[in-house]
Amino acid sequence: QESDNWDDLYTGGGGWDETIVPLSEAVRERMQSPWTEVCSSHVGFAVQPEVQALTPTGCSTTQELRCSEREFVTPMFLSEKEGTEFSLLFTFDSRSETTLEAGLNIMQTIFICFAVGLGA
């Protein structure tokens, strides 16, 4: 019954500057189930359904992503009590940006080689 009005309950019924995309049923189930992934000192779950840890208490981000493909974000506005009792860490997949950067770096190297070759 609670999952029927999940979006209204957790988005405040609207009024956001950004469009809120409804969570899939699989993500809702993961949020409501016990969080078992242990990444460093944090416990959580993966939002992407296709990402899973190899073991029940494993960390999917360290198994799926290289260090340069992960971006860590923590909330900056926590009360003093929240900061000592509860800690959030979001890990984002930055593979698309890493791939774009690699492609641009290759093109830059080719351009430099071409420019030096013409200048010689």
Image (tube, rainbow, N blue to C red):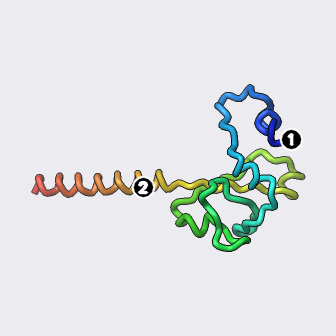
Q: Percent from the top left, x then y, of residue 81?
A: 89, 52
Q: In this orientation, which residue lies closer to the viewer: 77 or 71?
A: 71
Q: Nearer the viewer, mark 2 or mark 1?
A: 1
Indicate which disc residue 99 carries. Answer: 2
For residue 56, above or below residue 14 = below
Q: Determine whether, in the image, residue 86 is placed left or right of residue 46.
A: right
Identify the residue at image location x=11%, y=53%. 118
Residue tagged 1: 1
Mark 2 burial class by Cα count in 10 Å: few <14, some 14-19, many 20+: few
- What residue is drawn where x is 69% and y is 71%? 58
Quick one: SS at disc 1? loop
Please tell me how many numbered marks the rendered image carries.
2
Q: Residue furthest top?
A: 15
Q: Taking 80 as reference, is 55 left or right?
A: left
Identified by mark 2, the residue type is Thr
Location of the C terminus by quadrant is bottom left
Q: Can you tell which quarter of the image residue 34 is in?
A: bottom right
Query: Residue 53 has which mark?
Result: none
Image quadrant holding the N terminus, namely top right
Amino acid carrying label 1: it is Gln
Which is nearer the eye, 64 or 4? 4
Quarter where residue 37 is shown: bottom right
**Image location (x, y in percent) of residue 42:** 75, 64
